[in-house]
Amino acid sequence: MSQPETITLDLNGFPTRIWRKGQGPVLGFLAGFGGLPRWVPFLDRLAERRTVIVPSLPGFPGGDRGHSVLDSHLDWLLATRQLLVAAGLEGADLAGSSVGASLAAEMAAVWPQAVRRLALIAPFGLYDEEDPPADPWAQRAEVLPGLLTADPETWRALKALPESANSVEWPIEQTRAAEAAARIFWPLGNTGLERRLPLIKAPTLLLWGAEDRIMPRSYAARFAARLGGPNETRIIPGAAHLAELDQPDAVARAILDWTE
């Protein structure tokens, strides 16, 4: 698995990593809970047919401490918008997972011209008190991997310290990613996105892991019912909340077929 090209740009005074790999029409991806501290097979599958651009969200791995100056949901939307434009993703296809999927949906709702086609993997942003999501910030460290992925070793491998990494800085960066997501979604993950879903006219693919223990599968129907444009829902067998880590080939194939 070859490594992507890495570009660093300034976002609100903080260095921010942009990964780029592949050929063909541009496809952006916003990572899910915990971010992406390393390139993963799912992105390689996408890069076989598309130019994949992966901007790091503020505070996520590669996003330095950019979350520290974002105090409101509007701040997050504007920062994400700036990031996508700077990364060359204006008007491109956009995919996202989990917390990144919620922000991708916001981009398509508030700036409809910014997104051509949309693919969302178990997005955050809605809350039903009769069927609440699990709170990932309330989980013990040893429990979280089994909630986010069908095979806990997949999550542990993603977060394992690389030989070249600073052993002090690495765990700080991983903790910072959870903190950054909490600034957007804690305590209940309800950002009011449901009111903005009718504004999304971009054709939208909803992907849900059959074993998702964070976002109940009922939320797929809630999203689909509120979207303003054509949409389709697909359930991914053998996958949990971060389906792209559990089933990289199946999820990548679904996204590529939807956006081509």
Image (cartoon, grey):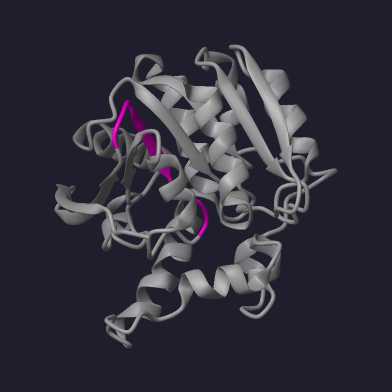
Q: Position of residue 58 (x, y in %)?
A: 32, 53
Residue 213 in percent (x, y) is at 75, 56
**Residue 179 in which image quadrant:** bottom left
Q: Is the N terminus in the top left, top right, bottom left or bottom right quadrant?
A: bottom left
Q: Is residue 30 magenta?
A: yes
Name the image quarter holding residue 161.
bottom left
Q: Where is 92 relative to 126, above or below? A: above
List the single residue furthest toward the bottom.
Answer: 167
Q: Position of residue 128 (x, y in %)?
A: 76, 40
| Residue 10 position in % (x across, y down) | 14, 49
Residue at image location 34% in from the left, 24% down from the top = 92
Residue appearing at x 36%, y 49% in the figure: 71
Q: Is residue 235 above or below residue 151?
A: above
Magenta residues, as a range? 23-33
Residue in view at x 62 percent, y 43 percent:
250
Above or below for 87 versus 55: above
